[in-house]
């Protein structure tokens, strides 16, 4: 089963979804690019945006031949004392929204987002586990989540017990306001890994060239120590200047490392391949071929294969995901009923 482990959903909340979208600072200039990547326009923000966005995403999943996409909730930032850091995030997607999407559409798998400092964090975790969550998604450097704090250990232990995967952003972040740059390192997953949580370091700790620290070597070293650590290749075929030729060579040549990479697109962040071609990681013919794919998800998948990511990266998640049997049964039932 081929699964995209890293897909964002966005909403305006105008029709009761509970989502909101308020890009701040430099993030505002990237908003039109993200919309275009989904085949949408600014006017759609004033319509029933959630429905328009979800249907666009479903079309992309179908066009790419992906069996399922993990759709991500988005938590708000919190202070260490559990109080909300208002007016600091760029968008919010509640857990109920992604849980509902997964129930309505068998091609979606839900990743919830819960700040462990919240006073109701454990109760919300139990609710989401019961609701069918397969992952917990976070951006530690943007949401002020230091997973190595001792007081978060019971939360992580419950995740490990339930088999809930922790998908955590690592490395550069240029589409959202950053509150804690020090939490971009994969090392902030140490306690989670030690208590037995399966973790995915999104972007493999890569950093934008000449702008941000790069933690790829730290990520690789941690995979040697922790068998429950994976990385995803989301955003590594874009214009972010965060992936280097030596890193791709290492993934191609190192069997042990290649076995820890999962496929992720990071939609609606658009794939390009231009930087990869300019750096010699991708042939210009492959780059030209990728431009023939109108749907960005299909283009991203083609680019990842041309870069040398193995086919197993697209199916590996199915072997470690909780609740997949229930998802398969629901998808079969809906297919038989014409749903």
Image (cartoon, rainbow, N blue to C red):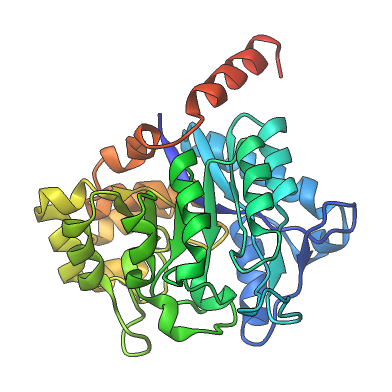
Q: Position of residue 259 (x, y in %)?
A: 21, 45
**What is the residue that sits farthest to the top in this orientation?**
336
Residue appearing at x 38%, y 39% in the figure: 317
From the top left corner, tell me how far across and down residue 170 is, in percent: 40, 69
* 130 lies above or below 28: above
Q: How many discs mark residues in the rendered view?
A: 0
Image quarter in which the C terminus is found: top right
- Quadrant of the rendered structure where residue 20 is? bottom right
Q: Is residue 128 above or below residue 325?
A: below
Can residue 227 be seen here? The reply is yes
One can see residue 281 in this view = no
Image quadrant in which you'd find residue 143:
bottom right
The residue at the point 62 percent across, 29 percent down is: 106
Instruction: Find residue 70 and report its image quarter.
Output: top right
Left or right: residue 217 compared with residue 46: left
Identify the residue at the far right of this view: 15
Q: Is residue 202 left or right of residue 92?
A: left
The residue nearer to you, when weighing 281 against 203, is 203
Question: Which residue sits at x=61%, y=76%?
Answer: 30
Along the horizontal axis of the image, is 279 left or right of 119? left
Quarter occupied by the N terminus: top left
The spot of residue 138 in percent (x, y) is 53, 63
Q: Nearer the viewer, residue 257 or 78?
A: 78
Tell me if residue 32 comes above or below residue 65 in the rendering.
below
Could you tell whether 101 is left or right of 330 in the image? right
């Amino acid at each position: 089963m081929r699964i995209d482990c890293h897909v964002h959903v966005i909403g305006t909340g105008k029709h009761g979804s509970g989502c909101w979208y308020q890009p701040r600072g430099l993030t505002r200039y990237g908003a039109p690019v993200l919309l275009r990547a989904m085949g949408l326009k600014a006017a759609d923000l004033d319509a029933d945006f959630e429905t328009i966005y979800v249907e666009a995403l479903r079309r992309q999943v179908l066009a790419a031949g992906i069996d399922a996409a993990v759709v991500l909730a988005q938590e708000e930032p919190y202070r260490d004392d559990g109080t909300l850091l208002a007016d600091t995030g760029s968008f919010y997607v509640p857990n109920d929204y992604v849980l509902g999407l997964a129930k309505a559409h068998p091609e979606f798998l839900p990743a919830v987002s819960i700040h462990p400092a919240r006073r109701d964090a454990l109760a919300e975790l139990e609710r989401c586990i019961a609701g069918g969550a397969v992952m917990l998604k976070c951006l530690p450097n943007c949401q002020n989540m230091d997973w190595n704090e001792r007081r978060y250990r019971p939360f992580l232990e419950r995740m490990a017990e339930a088999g809930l995967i922790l998908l955590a952003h690592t490395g550069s972040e240029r589409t959202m306001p950053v509150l804690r740059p020090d939490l971009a390192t994969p090392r902030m997953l140490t306690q989670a890994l030690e208590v037995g949580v399966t973790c995915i370091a999104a972007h493999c700790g890569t950093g934008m060239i000449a702008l941000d620290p790069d933690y790829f070597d730290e990520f690789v070293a941690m995979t040697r120590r922790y068998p429950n650590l994976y990385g995803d290749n989301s955003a590594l075929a874009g214009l972010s200047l965060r992936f280097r030729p030596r890193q791709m060579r290492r993934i191609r040549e190192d069997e042990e490392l290649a076995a820890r990479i999962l496929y992720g697109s990071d939609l609606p962040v658009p794939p390009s391949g231009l930087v990869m071609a300019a750096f010699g990681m991708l042939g210009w013919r492959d780059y030209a071929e990728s431009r023939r794919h109108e749907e960005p998800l299909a283009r991203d998948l083609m680019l990842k294969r041309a870069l040398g990511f193995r086919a197993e990266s697209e199916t590996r998640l199915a072997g470690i995901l909780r609740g997949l049997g229930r998802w398969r049964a629901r998808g079969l039932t809906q297919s038989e009923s014409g749903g």
